[in-house]
Amino acid sequence: MNIRKIADIAGVSPATVSRVFSRNPGVNKDIADKIRKIAVKYNYHPRISEKLKNVLIITPYNGSYPVQSCIDMLLMALTAELPEAGFRVEILPINSLERVPDIRFCAAAAIGIEPSALADWEDKFAEPLIFMDRHPGAVKSGNNVFFVNSDEFSGMELALKHLKERNCRKIGCIIHGNPGEGNVSLREQAIRAALKKLDLPDASQLIHFSGNDNSRYVEQVGKLLKLGVDALFCPGGCAGITVLYAMSLFNKRIPEDISLIASEQTFFSNYAVPPQTTVTQEYQQLARKVRELIEKYLAGENIPRISTLPYRLIVRESVK
Protein backbone atom coordinates (compact mmCIF):
# COMPACT_ATOMS: atom_id res chain seq x y z
CA MET A 1 0.00 0.00 0.00
CA ASN A 2 1.24 3.49 -0.89
CA ILE A 3 -0.09 7.03 -1.31
CA ARG A 4 -1.06 6.49 -4.96
CA LYS A 5 -3.16 3.41 -4.16
CA ILE A 6 -4.86 5.20 -1.25
CA ALA A 7 -5.61 8.09 -3.60
CA ASP A 8 -7.18 5.70 -6.13
CA ILE A 9 -9.40 4.10 -3.47
CA ALA A 10 -10.44 7.50 -2.09
CA GLY A 11 -11.01 8.98 -5.56
CA VAL A 12 -8.63 11.90 -4.98
CA SER A 13 -5.20 12.95 -6.15
CA PRO A 14 -1.98 11.70 -4.50
CA ALA A 15 -1.25 15.34 -3.64
CA THR A 16 -4.45 15.48 -1.57
CA VAL A 17 -3.46 12.33 0.31
CA SER A 18 -0.03 13.79 0.93
CA ARG A 19 -1.54 17.02 2.30
CA VAL A 20 -3.73 15.01 4.71
CA PHE A 21 -0.79 13.00 6.06
CA SER A 22 1.37 16.12 6.42
CA ARG A 23 -1.45 17.95 8.27
CA ASN A 24 -1.63 20.72 5.69
CA PRO A 25 -4.81 22.82 5.98
CA GLY A 26 -7.26 23.24 3.14
CA VAL A 27 -8.45 19.64 2.73
CA ASN A 28 -12.17 19.05 3.22
CA LYS A 29 -12.72 17.39 6.62
CA ASP A 30 -14.90 14.59 5.22
CA ILE A 31 -12.30 13.78 2.58
CA ALA A 32 -9.51 13.86 5.15
CA ASP A 33 -11.44 11.50 7.44
CA LYS A 34 -12.08 9.17 4.53
CA ILE A 35 -8.38 9.04 3.64
CA ARG A 36 -7.37 8.37 7.22
CA LYS A 37 -9.91 5.53 7.53
CA ILE A 38 -8.57 3.94 4.34
CA ALA A 39 -5.02 4.16 5.69
CA VAL A 40 -6.10 2.46 8.92
CA LYS A 41 -8.00 -0.26 7.03
CA TYR A 42 -4.93 -1.13 4.97
CA ASN A 43 -2.50 -0.65 7.89
CA TYR A 44 -0.66 2.13 6.07
CA HIS A 45 1.59 4.45 8.10
CA PRO A 46 3.17 7.35 6.23
CA ARG A 47 6.85 7.99 6.80
CA ILE A 48 7.41 10.75 9.34
CA SER A 49 9.65 13.52 8.06
CA GLU A 50 12.77 14.07 10.15
CA LYS A 51 12.50 17.75 9.18
CA LEU A 52 9.22 18.09 11.08
CA LYS A 53 10.33 18.98 14.59
CA ASN A 54 7.06 19.66 16.42
CA VAL A 55 6.36 17.56 19.53
CA LEU A 56 2.83 17.55 20.89
CA ILE A 57 2.52 17.41 24.70
CA ILE A 58 -0.90 16.20 25.86
CA THR A 59 -1.83 17.21 29.41
CA PRO A 60 -4.84 16.86 31.73
CA TYR A 61 -7.11 19.90 31.69
CA ASN A 62 -8.55 19.41 35.17
CA GLY A 63 -6.62 21.43 37.74
CA SER A 64 -7.60 19.09 40.58
CA TYR A 65 -5.99 16.06 38.92
CA PRO A 66 -4.39 13.87 41.61
CA VAL A 67 -0.78 14.37 40.56
CA GLN A 68 -0.79 17.98 39.42
CA SER A 69 2.60 18.70 41.01
CA CYS A 70 4.18 15.78 39.14
CA ILE A 71 2.60 16.99 35.90
CA ASP A 72 4.00 20.48 36.42
CA MET A 73 7.51 19.15 37.00
CA LEU A 74 7.39 16.79 34.02
CA LEU A 75 6.11 19.61 31.83
CA MET A 76 8.90 21.93 32.95
CA ALA A 77 11.48 19.21 32.28
CA LEU A 78 10.13 18.49 28.79
CA THR A 79 9.89 22.13 27.77
CA ALA A 80 13.54 22.54 28.82
CA GLU A 81 14.85 19.31 27.25
CA LEU A 82 13.12 19.16 23.86
CA PRO A 83 14.07 22.64 22.55
CA GLU A 84 17.73 21.87 23.29
CA ALA A 85 17.48 19.09 20.70
CA GLY A 86 15.84 21.42 18.17
CA PHE A 87 12.24 20.33 18.79
CA ARG A 88 9.36 22.77 19.03
CA VAL A 89 6.74 22.11 21.69
CA GLU A 90 2.96 22.48 21.43
CA ILE A 91 0.86 21.85 24.55
CA LEU A 92 -2.64 20.42 24.07
CA PRO A 93 -5.16 19.74 26.88
CA ILE A 94 -6.75 16.33 26.53
CA ASN A 95 -10.22 17.86 26.21
CA SER A 96 -9.06 19.31 22.86
CA LEU A 97 -8.06 16.00 21.27
CA GLU A 98 -10.28 16.66 18.26
CA ARG A 99 -7.60 19.13 17.13
CA VAL A 100 -4.87 16.49 16.79
CA PRO A 101 -5.61 15.53 13.16
CA ASP A 102 -5.11 19.18 12.16
CA ILE A 103 -1.77 19.62 13.95
CA ARG A 104 1.55 18.90 12.27
CA PHE A 105 3.83 16.99 14.64
CA CYS A 106 6.47 14.26 14.61
CA ALA A 107 5.77 12.75 18.04
CA ALA A 108 3.54 13.15 21.09
CA ALA A 109 4.13 12.83 24.83
CA ALA A 110 1.21 12.36 27.24
CA ILE A 111 1.78 13.53 30.83
CA GLY A 112 -0.42 12.04 33.56
CA ILE A 113 -2.94 10.68 31.03
CA GLU A 114 -4.48 7.24 31.45
CA PRO A 115 -3.49 4.95 28.54
CA SER A 116 -7.16 4.00 28.09
CA ALA A 117 -7.93 7.60 27.10
CA LEU A 118 -5.74 7.21 24.00
CA ALA A 119 -6.24 3.50 23.36
CA ASP A 120 -6.98 4.04 19.64
CA TRP A 121 -3.86 6.11 18.94
CA GLU A 122 -2.24 3.57 16.61
CA ASP A 123 -5.43 3.35 14.55
CA LYS A 124 -5.46 7.10 13.96
CA PHE A 125 -1.88 8.33 13.84
CA ALA A 126 1.47 7.20 12.50
CA GLU A 127 3.43 9.38 14.91
CA PRO A 128 4.80 7.80 18.11
CA LEU A 129 3.03 8.46 21.43
CA ILE A 130 5.00 8.25 24.68
CA PHE A 131 3.11 8.03 27.97
CA MET A 132 5.04 9.56 30.88
CA ASP A 133 4.58 8.46 34.49
CA ARG A 134 2.16 5.71 33.47
CA HIS A 135 2.34 1.93 33.15
CA PRO A 136 0.64 -0.12 30.41
CA GLY A 137 -1.46 -2.22 32.77
CA ALA A 138 -4.09 -4.20 30.89
CA VAL A 139 -4.32 -1.66 28.05
CA LYS A 140 -3.14 -3.02 24.70
CA SER A 141 -0.65 -0.68 23.07
CA GLY A 142 0.47 -0.69 19.47
CA ASN A 143 3.73 -0.48 17.58
CA ASN A 144 4.01 3.29 17.98
CA VAL A 145 2.95 3.57 21.66
CA PHE A 146 5.61 3.64 24.38
CA PHE A 147 5.98 4.26 28.12
CA VAL A 148 8.58 6.16 30.14
CA ASN A 149 8.05 5.81 33.88
CA SER A 150 9.71 5.40 37.27
CA ASP A 151 10.17 2.23 39.30
CA GLU A 152 7.41 2.52 41.91
CA PHE A 153 8.49 -0.60 43.77
CA SER A 154 12.07 0.53 44.33
CA GLY A 155 10.89 4.10 45.01
CA MET A 156 8.44 3.15 47.76
CA GLU A 157 11.00 0.79 49.29
CA LEU A 158 13.63 3.54 49.23
CA ALA A 159 11.49 5.75 51.49
CA LEU A 160 10.35 3.02 53.89
CA LYS A 161 13.86 1.60 54.22
CA HIS A 162 15.16 5.06 55.17
CA LEU A 163 12.50 5.36 57.87
CA LYS A 164 13.36 1.94 59.27
CA GLU A 165 17.07 2.78 59.31
CA ARG A 166 16.15 5.82 61.42
CA ASN A 167 14.39 3.53 63.94
CA CYS A 168 10.80 4.13 62.78
CA ARG A 169 8.80 0.97 63.39
CA LYS A 170 5.12 1.84 62.91
CA ILE A 171 4.71 3.77 59.67
CA GLY A 172 1.43 5.22 58.46
CA CYS A 173 1.03 5.75 54.71
CA ILE A 174 -1.29 8.15 52.88
CA ILE A 175 -1.19 7.60 49.10
CA HIS A 176 -2.43 10.57 47.07
CA GLY A 177 -5.41 9.76 44.83
CA ASN A 178 -7.95 6.94 44.65
CA PRO A 179 -7.33 3.24 43.95
CA GLY A 180 -7.51 2.55 40.22
CA GLU A 181 -6.37 6.05 39.22
CA GLY A 182 -2.93 6.79 37.85
CA ASN A 183 -0.22 4.93 39.78
CA VAL A 184 -2.19 4.75 43.06
CA SER A 185 -2.88 1.00 43.10
CA LEU A 186 0.65 0.25 41.92
CA ARG A 187 2.04 2.36 44.77
CA GLU A 188 -0.15 0.51 47.25
CA GLN A 189 1.20 -2.81 46.00
CA ALA A 190 4.74 -1.45 46.19
CA ILE A 191 4.25 -0.16 49.74
CA ARG A 192 2.81 -3.47 50.95
CA ALA A 193 5.66 -5.38 49.31
CA ALA A 194 8.25 -3.09 50.91
CA LEU A 195 6.66 -3.30 54.37
CA LYS A 196 6.73 -7.09 54.15
CA LYS A 197 10.31 -7.16 52.90
CA LEU A 198 11.44 -4.81 55.70
CA ASP A 199 9.48 -6.73 58.35
CA LEU A 200 7.36 -3.67 59.21
CA PRO A 201 3.65 -3.73 60.17
CA ASP A 202 1.36 -4.00 57.12
CA ALA A 203 -2.15 -3.37 58.41
CA SER A 204 -5.04 -1.98 56.39
CA GLN A 205 -5.68 0.74 58.98
CA LEU A 206 -2.13 2.02 58.41
CA ILE A 207 -2.57 2.59 54.64
CA HIS A 208 -4.95 5.34 53.50
CA PHE A 209 -5.84 7.12 50.26
CA SER A 210 -6.24 10.88 50.11
CA GLY A 211 -8.65 11.14 47.17
CA ASN A 212 -8.28 13.80 44.51
CA ASP A 213 -7.87 16.84 46.74
CA ASN A 214 -6.34 17.78 50.09
CA SER A 215 -9.50 17.87 52.23
CA ARG A 216 -9.12 14.36 53.73
CA TYR A 217 -5.54 14.64 54.93
CA VAL A 218 -6.37 16.17 58.32
CA GLU A 219 -8.82 13.37 59.16
CA GLN A 220 -6.45 10.66 57.96
CA VAL A 221 -3.44 12.06 59.78
CA GLY A 222 -5.56 12.21 62.96
CA LYS A 223 -6.57 8.56 62.62
CA LEU A 224 -2.98 7.47 62.10
CA LEU A 225 -1.77 9.47 65.09
CA LYS A 226 -4.39 7.73 67.27
CA LEU A 227 -2.94 4.40 66.15
CA GLY A 228 0.44 5.46 67.54
CA VAL A 229 2.45 5.76 64.32
CA ASP A 230 5.98 7.13 64.67
CA ALA A 231 6.34 8.12 61.01
CA LEU A 232 4.30 9.09 57.96
CA PHE A 233 5.07 8.30 54.33
CA CYS A 234 2.88 10.31 51.96
CA PRO A 235 3.74 9.82 48.27
CA GLY A 236 2.17 11.90 45.52
CA GLY A 237 0.34 15.18 45.11
CA CYS A 238 0.92 18.09 47.49
CA ALA A 239 1.16 15.90 50.60
CA GLY A 240 4.23 17.69 51.91
CA ILE A 241 2.33 20.94 52.43
CA THR A 242 -0.96 19.48 53.58
CA VAL A 243 0.51 17.00 56.06
CA LEU A 244 2.64 19.75 57.59
CA TYR A 245 -0.55 21.79 58.08
CA ALA A 246 -2.40 18.79 59.55
CA MET A 247 0.41 18.12 62.01
CA SER A 248 0.25 21.72 63.26
CA LEU A 249 -3.46 21.27 64.02
CA PHE A 250 -2.67 18.23 66.18
CA ASN A 251 0.17 20.10 67.90
CA LYS A 252 2.74 17.59 66.66
CA ARG A 253 6.25 18.53 65.64
CA ILE A 254 8.26 17.18 62.72
CA PRO A 255 10.56 15.34 63.24
CA GLU A 256 10.58 15.44 67.06
CA ASP A 257 7.18 13.74 67.39
CA ILE A 258 6.63 12.26 63.93
CA SER A 259 9.04 11.65 61.06
CA LEU A 260 7.80 12.47 57.56
CA ILE A 261 8.73 11.57 53.99
CA ALA A 262 6.69 13.03 51.13
CA SER A 263 7.15 13.42 47.37
CA GLU A 264 9.44 16.16 46.15
CA GLN A 265 7.88 19.50 45.27
CA THR A 266 10.48 21.70 43.65
CA PHE A 267 9.29 25.00 45.10
CA PHE A 268 8.36 23.78 48.56
CA SER A 269 10.17 20.74 49.96
CA ASN A 270 13.54 22.38 50.51
CA TYR A 271 11.98 25.53 52.00
CA ALA A 272 9.55 23.94 54.46
CA VAL A 273 10.24 24.13 58.20
CA PRO A 274 11.87 21.74 58.67
CA PRO A 275 13.09 21.00 55.11
CA GLN A 276 11.40 17.78 54.04
CA THR A 277 13.02 14.47 53.20
CA THR A 278 11.43 13.28 49.96
CA VAL A 279 11.43 10.65 47.25
CA THR A 280 11.48 12.02 43.73
CA GLN A 281 11.22 10.83 40.19
CA GLU A 282 14.17 11.96 38.09
CA TYR A 283 12.15 14.42 36.01
CA GLN A 284 14.98 15.71 33.84
CA GLN A 285 16.18 12.19 33.12
CA LEU A 286 12.63 11.14 32.21
CA ALA A 287 12.40 14.08 29.80
CA ARG A 288 15.81 13.21 28.35
CA LYS A 289 14.69 9.63 27.80
CA VAL A 290 11.60 10.86 25.93
CA ARG A 291 13.80 13.03 23.72
CA GLU A 292 16.15 10.12 23.01
CA LEU A 293 13.27 7.79 22.12
CA ILE A 294 11.78 10.34 19.73
CA GLU A 295 15.14 10.88 18.01
CA LYS A 296 15.73 7.14 17.63
CA TYR A 297 12.20 6.49 16.38
CA LEU A 298 12.51 9.19 13.72
CA ALA A 299 15.86 7.71 12.69
CA GLY A 300 14.18 4.35 12.12
CA GLU A 301 15.78 2.60 15.11
CA ASN A 302 14.00 0.06 17.29
CA ILE A 303 13.20 1.42 20.74
CA PRO A 304 11.96 -0.33 23.90
CA ARG A 305 8.23 -0.30 24.61
CA ILE A 306 8.83 0.49 28.30
CA SER A 307 11.68 2.51 29.80
CA THR A 308 11.77 2.56 33.61
CA LEU A 309 14.05 4.85 35.62
CA PRO A 310 14.87 4.75 39.36
CA TYR A 311 13.59 7.08 42.07
CA ARG A 312 15.94 9.14 44.22
CA LEU A 313 15.82 9.84 47.97
CA ILE A 314 16.59 13.42 49.02
CA VAL A 315 17.61 13.43 52.68
CA ARG A 316 16.81 16.61 54.61
CA GLU A 317 15.55 17.20 58.15
CA SER A 318 12.00 15.81 58.48
CA VAL A 319 13.15 12.36 59.63
CA LYS A 320 14.74 12.20 63.08
Image (tube, rainbow, N blue to C red):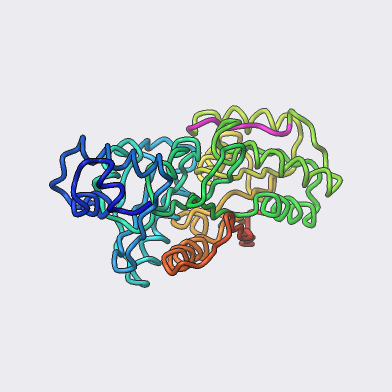
Q: Is residue 29 rendered to the left or right of residue 207?
A: left
147 in relation to 137, above or below: below
Quadrant where the C terminus is found in the figure: bottom right
Residue 266 at x, y = what percent? 47, 57
Q: Is residue 211 magenta?
A: yes
Closer to the camera in the image, 198 or 317: 198
Q: Is residue 124 magenta?
A: no
Closer to the camera in the image, 219 or 238: 238
**Residue at (69% x, 53% y) in the render:** 159
**Residue at (37% x, 47% y) in the render:** 125
Magenta-tinted stretch = 206-212
Q: Is residue 320 visible?
A: no
**Residue at (47% x, 38% y) in the render:** 119
**Residue lying farthest right?**
199
Q: Is residue 124 rendered to the left or right of residue 240?
A: left
**Residue at (69% x, 45% y) in the render:** 258
Place residue 86 in its image quadrant. bottom left
Query: How many numbered discs, if any?
Result: 0
